[in-house]
Image: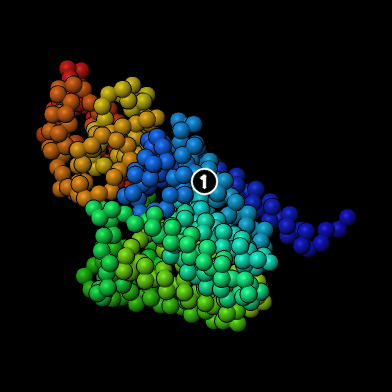
Protein backbone atom coordinates (compact mmCIF):
# COMPACT_ATOMS: atom_id res chain seq x y z
CA UNK A 1 0.00 0.00 0.00
CA UNK A 2 1.34 3.41 -1.00
CA UNK A 3 1.02 6.14 1.59
CA UNK A 4 -0.03 9.63 0.59
CA UNK A 5 2.43 12.46 1.04
CA UNK A 6 0.38 13.79 3.97
CA UNK A 7 0.50 10.39 5.67
CA UNK A 8 4.26 10.10 5.12
CA UNK A 9 4.79 13.58 6.52
CA UNK A 10 2.74 12.72 9.58
CA UNK A 11 4.74 9.56 10.18
CA UNK A 12 8.00 11.48 9.88
CA UNK A 13 6.63 14.16 12.22
CA UNK A 14 5.72 11.48 14.78
CA UNK A 15 9.19 9.98 14.44
CA UNK A 16 10.72 13.45 14.97
CA UNK A 17 8.53 13.85 18.05
CA UNK A 18 9.77 10.53 19.44
CA UNK A 19 13.39 11.54 18.78
CA UNK A 20 12.82 14.92 20.43
CA UNK A 21 11.24 13.29 23.48
CA UNK A 22 14.14 10.85 23.78
CA UNK A 23 16.83 13.52 23.31
CA UNK A 24 15.15 15.89 25.75
CA UNK A 25 14.74 13.11 28.32
CA UNK A 26 18.41 12.20 28.07
CA UNK A 27 19.51 15.83 28.38
CA UNK A 28 17.23 16.43 31.36
CA UNK A 29 18.75 13.41 33.09
CA UNK A 30 22.24 14.89 32.73
CA UNK A 31 21.29 18.50 33.46
CA UNK A 32 22.21 19.92 36.87
CA UNK A 33 19.49 22.44 37.69
CA UNK A 34 20.46 25.94 38.70
CA UNK A 35 18.92 28.25 41.26
CA UNK A 36 16.03 29.64 39.21
CA UNK A 37 14.82 26.14 38.34
CA UNK A 38 15.06 24.86 41.90
CA UNK A 39 13.51 28.02 43.37
CA UNK A 40 10.07 27.00 42.04
CA UNK A 41 10.51 23.44 43.32
CA UNK A 42 11.41 24.63 46.82
CA UNK A 43 8.53 27.11 46.91
CA UNK A 44 6.09 24.29 46.16
CA UNK A 45 7.84 21.74 48.37
CA UNK A 46 8.06 23.97 51.42
CA UNK A 47 4.55 25.44 51.23
CA UNK A 48 2.07 23.47 53.33
CA UNK A 49 -1.07 24.97 51.84
CA UNK A 50 -2.33 27.08 48.95
CA UNK A 51 -2.40 30.12 51.21
CA UNK A 52 1.21 29.54 52.23
CA UNK A 53 2.22 29.02 48.61
CA UNK A 54 0.59 32.33 47.73
CA UNK A 55 2.50 34.12 50.51
CA UNK A 56 5.80 32.46 49.61
CA UNK A 57 5.56 33.35 45.92
CA UNK A 58 4.85 37.06 46.38
CA UNK A 59 8.49 37.96 45.67
CA UNK A 60 8.70 35.93 42.45
CA UNK A 61 7.08 38.39 40.05
CA UNK A 62 5.44 35.42 38.27
CA UNK A 63 1.89 34.06 38.05
CA UNK A 64 1.12 31.07 40.21
CA UNK A 65 0.27 28.37 37.64
CA UNK A 66 3.66 26.60 37.46
CA UNK A 67 3.94 26.52 41.24
CA UNK A 68 0.43 25.10 41.51
CA UNK A 69 1.31 22.30 39.09
CA UNK A 70 4.41 21.51 41.17
CA UNK A 71 2.55 21.41 44.46
CA UNK A 72 1.50 17.75 44.31
CA UNK A 73 4.72 16.23 42.87
CA UNK A 74 6.80 18.30 45.30
CA UNK A 75 4.92 16.77 48.23
CA UNK A 76 4.94 13.24 46.81
CA UNK A 77 8.50 12.91 45.49
CA UNK A 78 11.71 13.71 47.34
CA UNK A 79 13.75 14.44 44.21
CA UNK A 80 13.36 17.55 42.05
CA UNK A 81 13.72 15.20 39.08
CA UNK A 82 9.93 15.00 39.40
CA UNK A 83 9.79 18.62 38.25
CA UNK A 84 11.97 17.77 35.28
CA UNK A 85 9.58 14.95 34.37
CA UNK A 86 6.66 17.38 34.43
CA UNK A 87 8.63 19.85 32.35
CA UNK A 88 9.43 17.08 29.87
CA UNK A 89 5.69 16.49 29.42
CA UNK A 90 5.00 20.19 28.85
CA UNK A 91 7.90 20.70 26.41
CA UNK A 92 7.06 17.52 24.51
CA UNK A 93 3.41 18.57 24.23
CA UNK A 94 4.48 21.95 22.83
CA UNK A 95 6.72 20.16 20.33
CA UNK A 96 3.85 17.90 19.28
CA UNK A 97 1.67 20.92 18.48
CA UNK A 98 4.37 22.37 16.21
CA UNK A 99 5.22 19.12 14.45
CA UNK A 100 1.63 18.03 13.90
CA UNK A 101 -0.23 21.32 13.44
CA UNK A 102 2.09 24.09 12.22
CA UNK A 103 1.59 25.03 8.52
CA UNK A 104 5.32 25.02 7.76
CA UNK A 105 7.23 22.55 5.62
CA UNK A 106 8.21 19.35 7.38
CA UNK A 107 11.97 20.18 7.38
CA UNK A 108 11.18 23.61 8.84
CA UNK A 109 9.04 22.11 11.60
CA UNK A 110 11.76 19.65 12.53
CA UNK A 111 14.43 22.36 12.60
CA UNK A 112 12.17 24.63 14.67
CA UNK A 113 11.73 22.12 17.49
CA UNK A 114 15.42 21.19 17.50
CA UNK A 115 16.48 24.84 17.65
CA UNK A 116 18.14 26.32 20.71
CA UNK A 117 15.12 27.97 22.31
CA UNK A 118 12.61 25.07 22.15
CA UNK A 119 15.15 22.34 22.90
CA UNK A 120 17.39 23.97 25.48
CA UNK A 121 16.06 27.22 26.90
CA UNK A 122 12.43 26.04 27.10
CA UNK A 123 13.17 22.31 27.17
CA UNK A 124 16.24 21.34 29.17
CA UNK A 125 15.93 24.24 31.62
CA UNK A 126 12.83 23.51 33.71
CA UNK A 127 11.04 26.82 34.11
CA UNK A 128 7.49 28.08 33.75
CA UNK A 129 8.27 29.55 30.31
CA UNK A 130 7.60 26.21 28.62
CA UNK A 131 3.97 26.48 29.72
CA UNK A 132 3.73 29.85 27.99
CA UNK A 133 5.26 28.34 24.85
CA UNK A 134 2.66 25.55 24.95
CA UNK A 135 -0.14 28.10 25.36
CA UNK A 136 1.21 30.16 22.46
CA UNK A 137 1.34 27.17 20.09
CA UNK A 138 -2.10 25.99 21.16
CA UNK A 139 -3.45 29.49 20.48
CA UNK A 140 -1.92 29.43 17.00
CA UNK A 141 -3.46 26.02 16.28
CA UNK A 142 -6.85 27.25 17.48
CA UNK A 143 -6.62 30.50 15.49
CA UNK A 144 -5.80 28.47 12.40
CA UNK A 145 -8.53 25.88 12.67
CA UNK A 146 -11.09 26.34 15.45
CA UNK A 147 -14.69 27.28 14.63
CA UNK A 148 -15.06 29.31 17.83
CA UNK A 149 -12.71 31.71 19.62
CA UNK A 150 -12.90 29.89 22.96
CA UNK A 151 -9.98 27.45 22.44
CA UNK A 152 -7.73 30.36 21.40
CA UNK A 153 -8.86 32.39 24.42
CA UNK A 154 -8.20 29.46 26.77
CA UNK A 155 -4.72 28.97 25.29
CA UNK A 156 -3.93 32.68 25.58
CA UNK A 157 -5.06 32.71 29.23
CA UNK A 158 -2.87 29.65 29.85
CA UNK A 159 0.11 31.42 28.29
CA UNK A 160 -0.46 34.56 30.37
CA UNK A 161 -0.91 32.72 33.66
CA UNK A 162 2.29 30.73 33.15
CA UNK A 163 4.82 33.59 33.03
CA UNK A 164 5.13 37.39 32.84
CA UNK A 165 6.18 37.08 29.19
CA UNK A 166 2.84 35.42 28.55
CA UNK A 167 1.20 38.57 29.89
CA UNK A 168 3.35 40.69 27.56
CA UNK A 169 2.48 38.70 24.41
CA UNK A 170 -1.20 38.31 25.33
CA UNK A 171 -2.20 41.59 23.59
CA UNK A 172 -0.79 40.15 20.35
CA UNK A 173 -3.00 37.07 20.71
CA UNK A 174 -5.92 39.30 21.61
CA UNK A 175 -5.40 41.31 18.42
CA UNK A 176 -5.36 38.11 16.36
CA UNK A 177 -8.56 36.86 18.01
CA UNK A 178 -10.29 40.22 17.50
CA UNK A 179 -9.36 40.33 13.80
CA UNK A 180 -10.30 36.74 12.93
CA UNK A 181 -13.09 37.30 10.37
CA UNK A 182 -15.13 34.21 11.25
CA UNK A 183 -15.45 35.32 14.88
CA UNK A 184 -16.47 38.95 14.44
CA UNK A 185 -20.05 38.45 15.60
CA UNK A 186 -19.17 36.41 18.67
CA UNK A 187 -15.97 37.89 19.95
CA UNK A 188 -17.10 40.33 22.65
CA UNK A 189 -17.55 37.83 25.49
CA UNK A 190 -14.44 35.78 24.61
CA UNK A 191 -12.32 38.94 24.47
CA UNK A 192 -13.74 40.04 27.83
CA UNK A 193 -12.78 36.67 29.31
CA UNK A 194 -9.30 37.03 27.78
CA UNK A 195 -8.86 40.48 29.31
CA UNK A 196 -9.99 39.16 32.71
CA UNK A 197 -7.63 36.17 32.50
CA UNK A 198 -4.66 38.32 31.52
CA UNK A 199 -5.51 40.88 34.21
CA UNK A 200 -5.56 38.08 36.78
CA UNK A 201 -2.12 36.95 35.62
CA UNK A 202 -0.76 40.51 35.70
CA UNK A 203 -2.12 41.00 39.21
CA UNK A 204 -0.33 37.86 40.39
CA UNK A 205 2.94 39.28 39.02
CA UNK A 206 2.73 42.42 41.17
CA UNK A 207 5.35 42.06 43.94
CA UNK A 208 5.43 43.74 47.36
CA UNK A 209 6.91 47.23 47.65
CA UNK A 210 10.24 45.90 48.95
CA UNK A 211 10.81 43.62 45.96
CA UNK A 212 14.48 43.72 45.01
CA UNK A 213 14.49 43.22 41.20
CA UNK A 214 13.42 45.56 38.39
CA UNK A 215 12.04 48.05 40.86
CA UNK A 216 11.90 51.10 38.61
CA UNK A 217 10.08 52.04 35.42
CA UNK A 218 12.60 53.61 33.05
CA UNK A 219 11.33 56.25 30.63
CA UNK A 220 14.51 58.26 30.11
CA UNK A 221 16.75 57.46 27.14
CA UNK A 222 19.95 55.56 27.86
CA UNK A 223 22.33 54.40 25.12
CA UNK A 224 23.59 51.56 27.31
CA UNK A 225 20.06 50.33 28.06
CA UNK A 226 19.09 50.53 24.38
CA UNK A 227 22.21 48.54 23.50
CA UNK A 228 21.52 45.95 26.19
CA UNK A 229 17.91 45.39 25.10
CA UNK A 230 18.63 45.30 21.38
CA UNK A 231 21.62 43.01 21.91
CA UNK A 232 19.44 40.65 23.93
CA UNK A 233 16.84 40.32 21.21
CA UNK A 234 19.46 40.03 18.46
CA UNK A 235 21.21 37.23 20.36
CA UNK A 236 17.89 35.40 20.84
CA UNK A 237 17.15 35.67 17.11
CA UNK A 238 20.63 34.49 16.10
CA UNK A 239 21.84 32.56 19.18
CA UNK A 240 25.34 31.66 18.06
CA UNK A 241 27.22 31.25 21.37
CA UNK A 242 30.82 32.17 21.98
CA UNK A 243 33.22 29.36 22.77
CA UNK A 244 34.15 28.20 26.23
CA UNK A 245 32.50 26.75 29.28
CA UNK A 246 30.33 29.77 30.06
CA UNK A 247 28.49 29.74 26.73
CA UNK A 248 25.05 30.40 28.23
CA UNK A 249 23.84 33.86 27.19
CA UNK A 250 27.04 34.55 25.27
CA UNK A 251 27.25 35.54 21.61
CA UNK A 252 29.90 35.12 18.95
CA UNK A 253 28.39 38.11 17.13
CA UNK A 254 27.86 40.67 19.87
CA UNK A 255 29.93 41.28 23.03
CA UNK A 256 28.18 40.99 26.36
CA UNK A 257 27.42 43.67 28.93
CA UNK A 258 29.22 45.50 30.53
CA UNK A 259 30.20 47.13 27.29
CA UNK A 260 33.65 48.60 26.76
CA UNK A 261 34.04 52.36 26.65
CA UNK A 262 32.20 53.85 23.69
CA UNK A 263 30.99 50.50 22.36
CA UNK A 264 27.32 50.80 23.35
CA UNK A 265 26.49 52.79 20.24
CA UNK A 266 28.06 50.34 17.79
CA UNK A 267 26.50 47.35 19.58
CA UNK A 268 23.10 49.05 19.51
CA UNK A 269 23.54 49.77 15.79
CA UNK A 270 24.46 46.20 14.83
CA UNK A 271 21.84 44.62 17.08
CA UNK A 272 19.30 47.19 15.90
CA UNK A 273 19.89 46.19 12.29
CA UNK A 274 19.23 42.52 13.16
CA UNK A 275 16.07 43.30 15.13
CA UNK A 276 14.75 45.89 12.65
CA UNK A 277 15.38 43.60 9.68
CA UNK A 278 13.49 40.80 11.44
CA UNK A 279 10.56 43.05 12.32
CA UNK A 280 10.39 44.38 8.76
CA UNK A 281 10.74 40.97 7.08
CA UNK A 282 8.03 39.33 9.19
CA UNK A 283 5.73 42.34 8.80
CA UNK A 284 6.20 42.30 5.03
CA UNK A 285 5.44 38.57 4.84
CA UNK A 286 2.42 38.85 7.13
CA UNK A 287 0.90 42.01 5.63
CA UNK A 288 -1.79 40.27 3.50
CA UNK A 289 -3.18 38.80 6.74
CA UNK A 290 -4.56 41.59 8.94
CA UNK A 291 -4.57 39.50 12.09
CA UNK A 292 -1.04 38.15 11.58
CA UNK A 293 0.32 41.64 10.88
CA UNK A 294 -1.50 43.16 13.85
CA UNK A 295 -0.36 40.39 16.19
CA UNK A 296 3.25 40.84 15.05
CA UNK A 297 3.36 44.61 15.40
CA UNK A 298 1.49 44.67 18.71
CA UNK A 299 3.58 41.83 20.15
CA UNK A 300 6.95 43.14 18.96
CA UNK A 301 6.26 46.61 20.35
CA UNK A 302 5.02 45.11 23.64
CA UNK A 303 8.15 42.98 24.06
CA UNK A 304 10.60 45.76 23.16
CA UNK A 305 8.91 48.32 25.40
CA UNK A 306 8.58 45.94 28.33
CA UNK A 307 12.28 45.08 28.10
CA UNK A 308 13.31 48.72 28.00
CA UNK A 309 11.02 50.29 30.58
CA UNK A 310 10.86 47.41 33.07
CA UNK A 311 12.87 44.19 32.63
CA UNK A 312 15.90 44.18 30.27
CA UNK A 313 15.97 40.43 30.78
CA UNK A 314 17.98 37.47 29.50
CA UNK A 315 17.76 35.03 26.59
CA UNK A 316 14.73 33.27 28.10
CA UNK A 317 12.86 36.59 27.95
CA UNK A 318 14.21 37.82 24.64
CA UNK A 319 13.41 34.49 22.98
CA UNK A 320 9.74 35.42 22.91
CA UNK A 321 10.36 37.68 19.92
CA UNK A 322 11.57 34.59 18.03
CA UNK A 323 8.51 32.65 19.19
CA UNK A 324 6.18 35.49 18.26
CA UNK A 325 7.69 35.69 14.77
CA UNK A 326 6.94 32.00 14.27
CA UNK A 327 3.42 32.45 15.64
CA UNK A 328 2.65 35.30 13.24
CA UNK A 329 4.10 33.44 10.26
CA UNK A 330 1.94 30.50 11.36
CA UNK A 331 -1.17 32.71 11.18
CA UNK A 332 -0.10 34.23 7.87
CA UNK A 333 0.42 30.78 6.39
CA UNK A 334 -2.95 29.60 7.71
CA UNK A 335 -4.54 32.60 5.93
CA UNK A 336 -2.71 31.82 2.70
CA UNK A 337 -0.66 35.00 2.93
CA UNK A 338 2.78 33.39 2.69
CA UNK A 339 3.84 30.25 0.81
CA UNK A 340 6.19 27.47 1.85
CA UNK A 341 9.15 28.71 -0.19
CA UNK A 342 8.97 32.18 1.29
CA UNK A 343 8.55 30.75 4.76
CA UNK A 344 11.69 28.68 4.32
CA UNK A 345 13.69 31.68 3.08
CA UNK A 346 12.57 33.78 6.04
CA UNK A 347 13.23 31.08 8.60
CA UNK A 348 16.51 29.74 7.20
CA UNK A 349 19.02 32.04 8.99
CA UNK A 350 17.23 31.73 12.32
CA UNK A 351 16.92 27.96 12.10
CA UNK A 352 20.51 27.39 11.02
CA UNK A 353 21.77 29.52 13.92
CA UNK A 354 19.28 27.94 16.30
CA UNK A 355 20.15 24.33 15.51
CA UNK A 356 23.87 25.10 15.71
CA UNK A 357 23.37 26.78 19.09
CA UNK A 358 21.24 23.85 20.33
CA UNK A 359 23.99 21.39 19.39
CA UNK A 360 26.61 23.43 21.26
CA UNK A 361 24.39 23.86 24.33
CA UNK A 362 23.45 20.17 24.46
CA UNK A 363 27.07 19.07 24.02
CA UNK A 364 28.34 21.45 26.69
CA UNK A 365 25.58 20.61 29.16
CA UNK A 366 26.17 16.89 28.61
CA UNK A 367 29.91 17.17 29.30
CA UNK A 368 30.05 19.90 31.95
CA UNK A 369 27.98 20.62 35.07
CA UNK A 370 25.46 23.39 34.50
CA UNK A 371 25.56 24.16 38.24
CA UNK A 372 27.48 22.83 41.21
CA UNK A 373 24.33 22.49 43.32
CA UNK A 374 23.55 18.81 42.67
CA UNK A 375 27.17 17.75 43.16
CA UNK A 376 27.42 19.69 46.42
CA UNK A 377 24.17 18.21 47.75
CA UNK A 378 25.30 14.69 46.85
CA UNK A 379 28.65 15.19 48.56
CA UNK A 380 27.04 16.62 51.69
CA UNK A 381 24.71 13.62 51.89
CA UNK A 382 27.43 11.08 51.06
CA UNK A 383 29.57 12.35 53.91
CA UNK A 384 26.63 12.46 56.32
CA UNK A 385 26.94 16.22 56.69
CA UNK A 386 23.29 16.91 55.86
CA UNK A 387 22.52 16.29 59.56
CA UNK A 388 24.57 19.37 60.46
CA UNK A 389 23.41 23.00 60.12
CA UNK A 390 24.12 24.44 56.68
CA UNK A 391 25.24 28.03 56.23
CA UNK A 392 25.33 29.55 52.76
CA UNK A 393 26.68 32.60 50.99
CA UNK A 394 26.08 33.99 48.45
CA UNK A 395 22.47 32.97 48.97
CA UNK A 396 21.58 33.01 45.25
CA UNK A 397 24.48 30.67 44.47
CA UNK A 398 24.00 28.05 47.18
CA UNK A 399 20.21 27.89 47.46
CA UNK A 400 20.11 25.14 44.85
CA UNK A 401 21.87 22.81 47.31
CA UNK A 402 18.80 23.04 49.56
CA UNK A 403 16.67 22.15 46.54
CA UNK A 404 18.58 18.91 45.97
CA UNK A 405 18.47 17.94 49.65
CA UNK A 406 15.10 16.56 50.81
CA UNK A 407 13.70 19.20 53.12
CA UNK A 408 17.02 21.01 52.89
CA UNK A 409 17.42 24.16 54.96
CA UNK A 410 20.22 26.73 54.88
CA UNK A 411 20.99 29.66 57.12
CA UNK A 412 21.50 32.74 54.94
CA UNK A 413 23.51 35.38 56.83
CA UNK A 414 22.63 38.10 54.30
CA UNK A 415 18.97 38.04 55.33
CA UNK A 416 19.48 36.37 58.72
CA UNK A 417 16.98 33.61 57.99
CA UNK A 418 16.84 29.84 57.77
CA UNK A 419 15.03 28.45 54.77
CA UNK A 420 15.42 26.97 51.32
CA UNK A 421 14.08 29.30 48.63
CA UNK A 422 15.28 32.88 48.41
CA UNK A 423 12.98 35.73 49.38
CA UNK A 424 13.88 38.44 46.88
CA UNK A 425 13.33 41.42 49.16
CA UNK A 426 15.43 44.38 50.13
CA UNK A 427 16.42 42.71 53.41
CA UNK A 428 18.94 40.62 51.48
CA UNK A 429 20.35 43.63 49.61
CA UNK A 430 23.41 43.57 51.89
CA UNK A 431 24.39 40.34 50.09
CA UNK A 432 26.76 42.15 47.74
CA UNK A 433 28.58 43.86 50.57
CA UNK A 434 28.79 40.86 52.88
CA UNK A 435 32.39 39.71 53.42
CA UNK A 436 33.59 36.19 54.16
CA UNK A 437 34.70 37.36 57.59
CA UNK A 438 31.16 38.48 58.37
CA UNK A 439 29.70 35.23 57.06
CA UNK A 440 32.03 33.10 59.17
CA UNK A 441 31.44 35.25 62.25
CA UNK A 442 27.65 35.08 61.85
CA UNK A 443 27.76 31.32 61.32
CA UNK A 444 30.04 30.73 64.33
CA UNK A 445 27.89 32.92 66.56
CA UNK A 446 24.71 31.17 65.49
CA UNK A 447 26.09 27.67 66.02
CA UNK A 448 27.88 28.48 69.30
CA UNK A 449 30.99 26.40 68.71
CA UNK A 450 29.11 23.39 67.30
CA UNK A 451 29.99 21.97 63.92
CA UNK A 452 28.34 23.34 60.78
CA UNK A 453 28.82 23.18 57.02
CA UNK A 454 29.72 26.43 55.29
CA UNK A 455 28.73 26.60 51.59
CA UNK A 456 30.38 29.28 49.45
CA UNK A 457 30.73 30.14 45.77
CA UNK A 458 34.37 31.15 46.26
CA UNK A 459 37.22 29.51 48.19
CA UNK A 460 37.47 30.47 51.82
CA UNK A 461 40.32 32.89 52.42
CA UNK A 462 43.34 31.24 54.05
CA UNK A 463 43.26 33.59 57.02
CA UNK A 464 39.69 32.44 57.82
CA UNK A 465 40.15 28.73 57.22
CA UNK A 466 41.96 27.81 60.42
CA UNK A 467 38.90 26.25 62.02
CA UNK A 468 37.44 24.82 58.82
CA UNK A 469 38.25 21.90 56.55
CA UNK A 470 37.41 21.85 52.86
CA UNK A 471 35.15 18.85 52.24
CA UNK A 472 33.36 19.77 48.99
CA UNK A 473 34.37 21.36 45.73
CA UNK A 474 31.97 21.21 42.77
CA UNK A 475 32.78 22.92 39.51
CA UNK A 476 33.70 24.87 37.56
CA UNK A 477 30.16 25.09 36.17
CA UNK A 478 28.48 26.60 33.12
CA UNK A 479 26.72 29.03 35.47
CA UNK A 480 29.96 30.62 36.60
CA UNK A 481 28.84 31.80 40.04
CA UNK A 482 27.53 28.33 40.97
CA UNK A 483 30.95 26.71 41.36
CA UNK A 484 30.67 25.69 45.02
CA UNK A 485 32.96 24.96 47.96
CA UNK A 486 31.91 23.36 51.21
CA UNK A 487 33.76 23.61 54.56
CA UNK A 488 33.23 21.70 57.79
CA UNK A 489 33.69 24.25 60.53
CA UNK A 490 33.50 24.43 64.31
CA UNK A 491 33.81 21.72 66.92
CA UNK A 492 36.83 19.61 67.82
CA UNK A 493 36.55 17.36 64.74
CA UNK A 494 36.81 20.13 62.20
CA UNK A 495 40.35 21.32 62.68
CA UNK A 496 42.30 21.95 59.54
Question: How many numbered tags mark residues here?
Answer: 1
- State the image quarter where residue 46 is shown: top left
Q: Position of residue 468 (x, y in %)?
A: 18, 27
Name the residue rendered at 52%, 73% in the picture. 175
Which quarter of the figure is the N terminus placed in?
bottom right
Q: Is residue 346 left or right of residue 481?
A: right
Q: Position of residue 321 (x, y in %)?
A: 46, 67
Residue 276 in view here:
yes
Q: Where is residue 461 in the image (x, y as percent from the top left)?
A: 15, 37
Query: In this view of the protein, which residue sits in the foreground, 113 or 348?
Result: 113
Residue 495 in view here:
no
Pointer 1 residue:
87
Query: In this view of the protein, which residue sits in the foreground, 80 or 458?
Result: 80
Name the residue rendered at 69%, 52% in the picture. 14
Q: Is residue 253 left or right of residue 324?
A: left
Q: Where is residue 123 in the image (x, y as percent from the top left)?
A: 51, 50
- State the image quarter where residue 464 is shown: top left
**8 in relation to 475, above or below:** below
Amino acid sequence: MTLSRASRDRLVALLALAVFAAVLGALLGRHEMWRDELQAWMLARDSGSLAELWRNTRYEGHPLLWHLLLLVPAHVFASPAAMQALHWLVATAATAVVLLRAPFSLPARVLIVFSYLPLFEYGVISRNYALTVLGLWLACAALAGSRTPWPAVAAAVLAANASPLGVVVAPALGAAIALTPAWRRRRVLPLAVLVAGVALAAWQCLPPSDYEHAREWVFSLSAERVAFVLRGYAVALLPVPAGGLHFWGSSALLPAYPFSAGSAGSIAALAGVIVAATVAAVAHAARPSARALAAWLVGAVSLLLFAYVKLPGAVRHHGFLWLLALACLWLAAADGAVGRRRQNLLLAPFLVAGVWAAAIAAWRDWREPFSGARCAAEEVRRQGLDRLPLVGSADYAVSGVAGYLPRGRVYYPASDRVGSFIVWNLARARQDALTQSEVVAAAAARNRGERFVLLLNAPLAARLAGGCRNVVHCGPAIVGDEELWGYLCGGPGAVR
